[in-house]
Image (tube, rainbow, N blue to C red):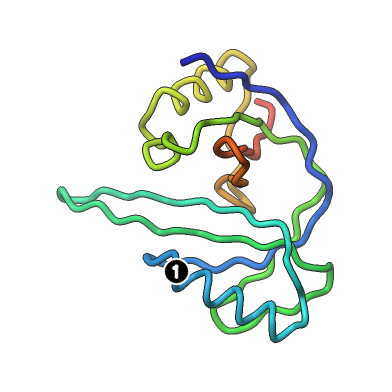
Amino acid sequence: MEYELTISKLDKMTLAMAYGAEEAEIEQKLDAYLAGKGIQDTRRFVSKLTVTARGVTNVAHIHYRQVPEGTEKAKDITIISLPEAEYIHIRIPEAEYDSFETGDSRKALQDYMQENKLAYDMSKVLFLAEKTDSGYDIMFPFKRK
């Protein structure tokens, strides 16, 4: 499959973040947090970190919700302030999201980064994936080498 990779600008935003092994539990935490703050339906992003050690694979799901600037953190909820910045943008079908870290779309991303002399910048987030009608828009923070 052919992938289109572009550089896109994301506006400054503040995100509430929660993570864990169970996505439903993470969503419940964020829903309760937002309800307690009186924050309604916000932009949602997901991310994940897969680690395999000694033949055992563990996945940490990371969920983000956009919140107003100045929103305070809470137990199990971290607040991240992202400056306006450029991100590498790739759109993938929903069926590819679970295998993204090892699939063809990941290879396309790595090739694009190498060709354009870009490096990951995971100082704030690993990546931000936003669900769309046709799959996911994934944004990767980067820095120029």
Of all residues shown, which one is farthest toward the front?
Answer: 133
In the rendered structure, the answer to whether residue 126 lies left or right of residue 83 reads left
Give how far across and how far down residue 139 sits, in percent.
64, 38
Residue at 46 percent across and 51 percent down: it is 48
Camera-side residue of 92 and 79: 92
Give how far across and how far down residue 46 sits, in percent.
55, 53
Mark 1 — residue?
24
Camera-side residue of 29 and 145: 29
In the rendered structure, the answer to whether residue 22 lies left or right of residue 118 reads left
| Element type at mark 1 | helix
Picture quadrant of residue 118: top right
Of all residues shown, which one is farthest toward the left?
Answer: 55
| Residue type of the residue flagged with mark 1 | Ala
Camera-side residue of 76 and 53: 76
Q: Around disc 1, counting alpha carbons within 10 Å, would you say few (fewer than 14), some (14 to 19), or many (20 or more)?
A: few
Residue at 55 percent across and 60 percent down: it is 63
Give how far across and how far down residue 11 sits, in percent.
83, 46
Looking at the picture, does residue 141 appear above or below residue 114? Answer: below
Give how far across and how far down residue 131 sits, in percent.
59, 46
Looking at the picture, does residue 70 appear above or below residue 62? Answer: below
* Quarter of the image that includes the C terminus: top right
Q: How many marks?
A: 1
In the rendered structure, the answer to whether residue 142 lies left or right of residue 104 reads right
Residue at 82 percent across and 68 percent down: it is 68
